[in-house]
Image (cartoon, helix red, strand yellow):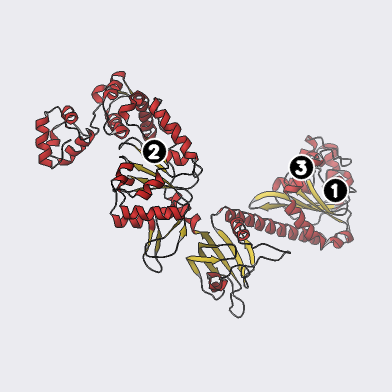
């Protein structure tokens, strides 16, 4: 609050009256009156200034360090008016929001040098009523006349203090003290102080925004540059600086690094075109340097133009294609969902398989997982990827039996549609990570042979182009049958088999590890409850025995299906034998006689075994033969 001039003699009378009687004259400013009362309640000495609350040197040094930007900026501002301050006996202080003096810029503060006052707290608890304490309490500028100050030895001068807000929060206090009444007018002191405050607020707010912007830019997965005409890099974020260093571009003798000196094809890049006023958006660019040649996706935005309409600078945003593929892979969910520890079992065969998988995960070899359908090969592949040095990279899955040969080839290697439209394949997307080839035995031999060639050379090529791109991928292949025999019979490419079979893990069928069934049942039921946020359920010993004695032709996948059906169709939290349907969601009613799809599901649940299916459906084998013929299925 900026106040008009007051009669100092009357103010002195008001002060004396309060000090002697405790009475407040109606002409005393309400904020001053409240501050006087509080100062008396706090028993603050009024004869002279007693400053005992000083921060320890090491603590004060840390505090000043955290406020160095404000201290330095105000120092630069004060330099220009220091002679003015000296001429009119003005003292300038910068305080933090807790009223600790961070810096004294001009003249002693009531006969205290900078060394004496800096690091001292001068709030109302220490010095009583002052313009500092009132400006802090009310968060508004305030002029305090000398006779209104609590400490008598300060009555000879006036003071004005103002809060400094950064983004709406009280961050600092600034005060200008006229130690002795001089020729300078009150308005001049106020104008100087408010100008300094406005300037400091603007500077610190801008600095916060710049720091936030720099933090955002440093956290992005893109390299960002501000490039001036001629190729000088005026700014680069953290990734940009790393990439510049990688191609030999660095700041020398305080000069900005220059791209035109290092990028050999600079005149053929979107940056050069940007200075001709031509923007580029997400363009695939090849950069040629003496250190290396690499590709990235680049966007160039021309900025301001000069009087002759020439572009003076451009902003460049780029990302290496390999980094982009990894980012897309993770965004698409190409990450490991399971760990090796998520596979449950304590039997001898399972434990041996799990230990071997943990060892194989650590090496760099390609890997082959063999086992019957439903044994958990996919989960094992996820666990191996997660336990490997490639865990931070993508895990890409290609199901070799899900597409036509033409689509599979495009999906695996990528394809160039035209000059502007080119798509990477899963082999490229998996770079830096793992490519899981499920049902690898179903991959056509010509595609398998091409894949084997790329893996040996370490480069891949999209369909329809001749550009070779480096690949860094580990293959985990899975096969339901004996891949070696298939390769010997000429049904699988021999070279690909040799590549993926350097390490082989065989997953045992569920019927050979029946001792793990109770643990598997408990684990599946727990997973279902957590996944669907439902109350947990348990299986009775009688139920466990039924599950233990079954052959499980569909292995763990079939067990999960059976338990899932029981979980959702059992009232209460206990699964009993009558709640178990070994055909999963296929009910043993007469629908299978009319619906081929239902019959096929039941037949698959029985593993294609007539005797087992007859027991499940409670009919004779002869009856089933009729329906096999009816639905055009082969008996086993």
Decide: few, some or many residues near mark 2? Use Cα within 10 Å; few <14, some 14-19, many ≥20.
some
- Distance, label 1 to label 3, CA atoms, is 14 Å
Question: Going by the image, does 624 lie left or right of 319?
Answer: left
- Distance, label 3 to label 2, CA atoms, is 72 Å
Q: What label does residue 379 carry, if any?
A: 2
Label pair 3/2, CB-CB below 8 angstroms: no
Question: Going by the image, does 300 lie left or right of 103?
Answer: left
- Marked residue nearer the N-terminal end (3 or 2): 3
Label pair 1/3, CB-CB below 8 angstroms: no
- The structure residue drawn at horizontal position 69% and vertical position 58%, both measured from the top left corner, is 203
Element type where label 3 sits in the image: helix
In the rendered view of the protein, which quadrant contains the C terminus? top left
Observer-side mark, 2 or 1, equals: 2
Decide: few, some or many residues near mark 1? Use Cα within 10 Å; few <14, some 14-19, many ≥20.
many
Between residue 217 and residue 39, name the one nearer to us: 217
Residue 537 appears in the picture as rendered: no
Q: What label does residue 147 carry, if any?
A: 1
Element type where label 1 sits in the image: helix
Q: Position of residue 231 (x, y in %)?
A: 62, 70
- Marked residue nearer the N-terminal end (2 or 1): 1
- The structure residue drawn at horizontal position 89% and vertical position 41%, both measured from the top left corner, is 48
Between residue 458 and residue 236, name the one nearer to us: 458
The residue under label 3 is 35
Q: Position of residue 522 (x, y in %)?
A: 37, 26
Residue found at the very far bottom of the displayed protein: 308
Decide: few, some or many residues near mark 3? Use Cα within 10 Å; few <14, some 14-19, many ≥20.
many
34 above or below 320?
above
Element type where label 2 sits in the image: helix
Between residue 602 and residue 23, name the one nearer to us: 602
- Marked residue nearer the N-terminal end (1 or 3): 3
């Amino acid at each position: 609050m900026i106040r008009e001039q007051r009669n100092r003699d009357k103010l002195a009378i008001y002060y004396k009256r309060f000090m002697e009687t405790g009475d407040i004259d109606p002409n005393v400013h309400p904020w001053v009156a409240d501050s006087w009362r509080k100062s008396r309640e706090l028993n603050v000495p009024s004869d002279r200034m007693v400053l005992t609350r000083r921060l320890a040197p090491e603590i004060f040094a840390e505090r000043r360090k955290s406020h160095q930007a404000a201290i330095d900026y105000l120092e630069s501002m004060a330099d220009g008016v220091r002679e003015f301050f000296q001429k009119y006996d003005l003292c300038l202080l910068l305080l933090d929001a807790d009223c600790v003096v961070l810096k004294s810029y001009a003249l002693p503060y009531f006969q205290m040098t900078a060394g004496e006052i800096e690091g001292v707290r001068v709030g109302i608890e220490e010095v009583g009523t002052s313009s500092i304490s009132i400006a802090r309490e009310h968060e508004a500028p305030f002029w305090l006349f000398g006779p209104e100050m609590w400490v008598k030895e300060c009555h000879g001068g006036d003071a004005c203090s103002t809060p400094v807000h950064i983004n709406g929060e009280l961050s600092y206090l600034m005060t200008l003290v006229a130690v002795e009444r001089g020729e300078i007018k009150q308005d001049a002191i106020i104008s100087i102080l408010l100008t300094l405050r406005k300037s400091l607020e603007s500077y610190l707010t801008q600095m916060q925004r710049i720091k936030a912007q720099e933090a955002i830019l440093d956290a992005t997965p893109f390299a960002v540059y501000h490039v001036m005409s001629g190729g000088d890099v005026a700014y680069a974020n953290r990734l940009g600086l790393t990439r510049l260093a990688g191609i030999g571009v660095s700041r020398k003798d305080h000069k900005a690094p220059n791209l035109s000196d290092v990028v050999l094809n600079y005149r053929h890049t979107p940056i050069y075109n940007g200075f001709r006023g031509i923007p580029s958006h997400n363009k695939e660019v090849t950069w040629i340097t003496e250190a290396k040649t690499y590709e990235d996706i680049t966007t160039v935005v021309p900025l301001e133009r000069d009087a002759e309409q020439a572009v003076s600078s451009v902003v460049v945003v780029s990302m290496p294609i390999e980094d982009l593929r990894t980012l897309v892979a993770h965004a698409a969910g190409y990450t490991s969902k399971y760990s090796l520890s998520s596979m449950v079992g304590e039997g001898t065969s399972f434990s041996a398989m799990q230990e071997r998988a943990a060892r194989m995960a650590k090496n760099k070899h390609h890997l082959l997982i063999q086992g019957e359908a439903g044994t958990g090969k996919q989960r094992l592949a996820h666990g191996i990827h997660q336990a490997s040095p490639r865990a931070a990279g993508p895990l890409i899955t290609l199901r070799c039996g899900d597409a036509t040969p033409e689509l599979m080839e495009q999906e695996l290697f990528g394809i160039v549609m035209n000059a502007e439209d080119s798509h990477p394949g899963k082999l490229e997307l998996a770079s830096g990570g793992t490519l899981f080839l499920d049902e690898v035995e179903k991959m056509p031999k010509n595609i398998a042979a091409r894949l084997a060639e790329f893996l040996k050379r370490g480069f891949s090529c999209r369909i329809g182009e001749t550009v070779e791109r480096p690949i860094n991928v580990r293959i985990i292949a899975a096969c339901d049958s004996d891949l070696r025999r298939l390769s010997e019979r000429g049904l699988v490419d021999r070279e690909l088999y040799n590549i993926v079979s350097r390490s082989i893990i065989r997953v045992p069928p569920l019927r050979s590890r029946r001792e793990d069934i109770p643990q598997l049942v408990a684990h599946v039921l727990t997973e279902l409850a957590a996944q669907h946020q439902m109350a947990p359920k348990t299986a009775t010993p009688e139920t466990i025995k039924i599950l233990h004695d079954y052959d499980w032709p569909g292995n763990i996948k079939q067990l999960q299906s059976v338990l899932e059906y029981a979980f959702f169709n059992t009232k209460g939290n206990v699964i009993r034998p009558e709640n178990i349907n070994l055909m999963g969601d296929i009910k043993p009613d007469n629908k299978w006689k009319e619906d081929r799809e239902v019959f096929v599901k039941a037949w698959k649940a029985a593993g294609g075994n007539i005797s087992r299916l007859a027991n499940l459906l409670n009919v004779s084998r002869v009856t089933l033969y009729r329906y096999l013929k009816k639905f055009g299925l082969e008996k086993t």
